[in-house]
C-alpha cells in the first residue's frame, strides 16, 4: 500500500512538473509574440525568458535586435552584427561581434568567419586568428594563403579543391606541348590571377595550339623571398635544390608576387597581381626572343644597340645599312645603331594593351618553328 502511495505521489509530481514546463514554454512564446507584435518592453521580456529569447532572437526585427545588442545581450550582439555585415556596415558590426565573440558557440564563430571571408574582411579574420578564436576551416585556410603562410602548412586537399597545388606536390609536365611552363604564386590573389591567365590563354592559345602548356598554380610561399618594391618584381629562391628541381621539370617558370613590374630574365618571368593578361602575353613573347619596342634600359642599349642585323624576331639594328623592306624605326635604341621594327604602328611589344596582331602572331609562329628546328638539329 505504501509503495502504491509513493508511486502515485511520484506520478503526480512528474505531471505537475510537465505542466509547469509547458506553461513556461507557453508563457515564453507569448512574451516573444508580444515583443514582435506589440510595444512590449523587449529588455524586460528578455530577462523574463532569456533562454527562449536567445534561441529565437534572430527572428526579432532589426531595430529590436539592435536595441538588445546595445544592452549588451551577447546573442543579440552576435545576430545584429550578422545583419550589419550583410548590409556592408562592417565597422559597425565589428563593435558588436567583438563583444560577443567569447560567448558564442564554435559553430557561430565559424558562420561569422565565413561571412567575413565572403566580404574579404582579411583584417577582421586576422584579428580573430590572433585571439585564437578563428575556427579551422575554409576561411582559416584562405586567410593563411592571403597572408602567405609557408606552403607546407596549407592542407593539400584544400589547395586541390581550389584547383591549385603545393610546391611539395609539383605537377607533372605535359608532353603534348612544345614548352611546359610552371605557374608559381606566393599568395592567394596571385594564385587566382595565374589561374585566370591560364584559363584565358587556353581559350585562345598563342601563337597556336600546342606551343605552351601551363601547370595549375603552384603555391610556394616560404620557398621564395620576394622584395616589396615598386620597381621590377623580384623573387629569389631560398633553396637551390628546389630551384633546380623546378628548372629540370619545366622549360619556363612564371612567378607572381604582390608587388613590382613585369620582367623576364632568361627562362623566368616575374610579375605581380597588378599585371593584366596582355602584359602576361607580352612577357611570354620574351620567352621566344622578342624585344621591347619602347626605349630599352641604358644598360641594355650599351651592348644590344652595338649589334648589327636581326637581334630579335621583331627588331633589326642598322649600323648605316638600309633596313629590311617594310620595316620602320623603333624607339628601342637611342644610342649605337638605329633600331627597326616590322610594324609602322604600335604593337604589343611597344604597348601591351593593344593585344597581339596577326602580323606579330605570324612572326611568333615562325620563331617557334625555327627554335624547334634548332632543337631537333
Image (tube, rainbow, N blue to C red):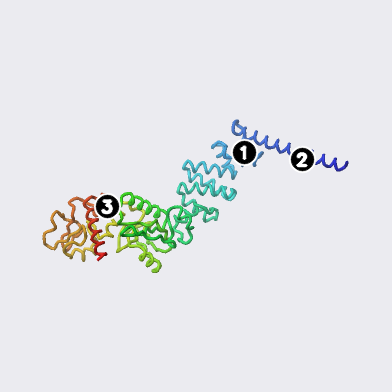
319 with respect to 19 (left or right): left
Q: Which residue is mark 2?
A: 14
The quadrant the C terminus occupies is bottom left
Q: How far apart are labels 2 and 1 at the CA level?
A: 32 Å
Q: Nearer the viewer, residue 234 or 43?
A: 234
Alpha-carbon neighbours of circle 3 within 10 Å: few (<14), some, or many (≥20)? Answer: some
Between circles 1 and 3, the one closer to the viewer is: 3
- Seen as rendered, the residue at the extreme left is 321
In the picture, the disc for residue 352 is 3
Mark found first going from the N terminus, 2 or 1:
2
Q: Which mark is residue 43?
A: 1
- Spatial separation of the CA atoms under disc 1 and disc 3: 63 Å
In-front residue for pair 267/344: 267
Q: Tell me if residue 77 comes above or below residue 333 in the rendering.
A: above
Q: Secondary structure at mark 1?
A: helix
Residue visible at 68% across and 37% down in the picture: 25
Amino acid at each position: 500500500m505504501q509503495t502504491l502511495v509513493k508511486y502515485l505521489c511520484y506520478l503526480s509530481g512528474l505531471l505537475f512538473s510537465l505542466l509547469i514546463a509547458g506553461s513556461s514554454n507557453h508563457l515564453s512564446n507569448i512574451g516573444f509574440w508580444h515583443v514582435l507584435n506589440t510595444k512590449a518592453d523587449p529588455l524586460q521580456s528578455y530577462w523574463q525568458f532569456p533562454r527562449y529569447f536567445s534561441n529565437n532572437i534572430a527572428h526579432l526585427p532589426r531595430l529590436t535586435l539592435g536595441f538588445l545588442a546595445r544592452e549588451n545581450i551577447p546573442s543579440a550582439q552576435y545576430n545584429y552584427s550578422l545583419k550589419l555585415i550583410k548590409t556592408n556596415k562592417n565597422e559597425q558590426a565589428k563593435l558588436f561581434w567583438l563583444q560577443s565573440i567569447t560567448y558564442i558557440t564554435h559553430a557561430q564563430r565559424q558562420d561569422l568567419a565565413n561571412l567575413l571571408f565572403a566580404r574579404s574582411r582579411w583584417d577582421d579574420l586576422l584579428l580573430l586568428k590572433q585571439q585564437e578564436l578563428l575556427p579551422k576551416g575554409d576561411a582559416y585556410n584562405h586567410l593563411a594563403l592571403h597572408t602567405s603562410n609557408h606552403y607546407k602548412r596549407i592542407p593539400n586537399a584544400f589547395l586541390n579543391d581550389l584547383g591549385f597545388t603545393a610546391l611539395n606536390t609539383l605537377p607533372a609536365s605535359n608532353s603534348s606541348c612544345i614548352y611546359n611552363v610552371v605557374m608559381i604564386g606566393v599568395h592567394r590573389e596571385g594564385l587566382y590571377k595565374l589561374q585566370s591567365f591560364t584559363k584565358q590563354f587556353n581559350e585562345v592559345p598563342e601563337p597556336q595550339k600546342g606551343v605552351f602548356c601551363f601547370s595549375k598554380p603552384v603555391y610556394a610561399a616560404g620557398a621564395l623571398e620576394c622584395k616589396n618594391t615598386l620597381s621590377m618584381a623580384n623573387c629569389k629562391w631560398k633553396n637551390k635544390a628546389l630551384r633546380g628541381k623546378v628548372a629540370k621539370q619545366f622549360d619556363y617558370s612564371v612567378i607572381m608576387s604582390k608587388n613590382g613590374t613585369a620582367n623576364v630574365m632568361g627562362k623566368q618571368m616575374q610579375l605581380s597581381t597588378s599585371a593584366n593578361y596582355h602584359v602576361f602575353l607580352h612577357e611570354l613573347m620574351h620567352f621566344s626572343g622578342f624585344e621591347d619596342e619602347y626605349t630599352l634600359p641604358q644598360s641594355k642599349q650599351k651592348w644590344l644597340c652595338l649589334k648589327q642585323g636581326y637581334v630579335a624576331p621583331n627588331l633589326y639594328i642598322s649600323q648605316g645599312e638600309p633596313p629590311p623592306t617594310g620595316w620602320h624605326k623603333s624607339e628601342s635604341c637611342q644610342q649605337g645603331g638605329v633600331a627597326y621594327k616590322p610594324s609602322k604602328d604600335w604593337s604589343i611589344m611597344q604597348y601591351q594593351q593593344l593585344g597581339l596582331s596577326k602580323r606579330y602572331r605570324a612572326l611568333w609562329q615562325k620563331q617557334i618553328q625555327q627554335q624547334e628546328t634548332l632543337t631537333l638539329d
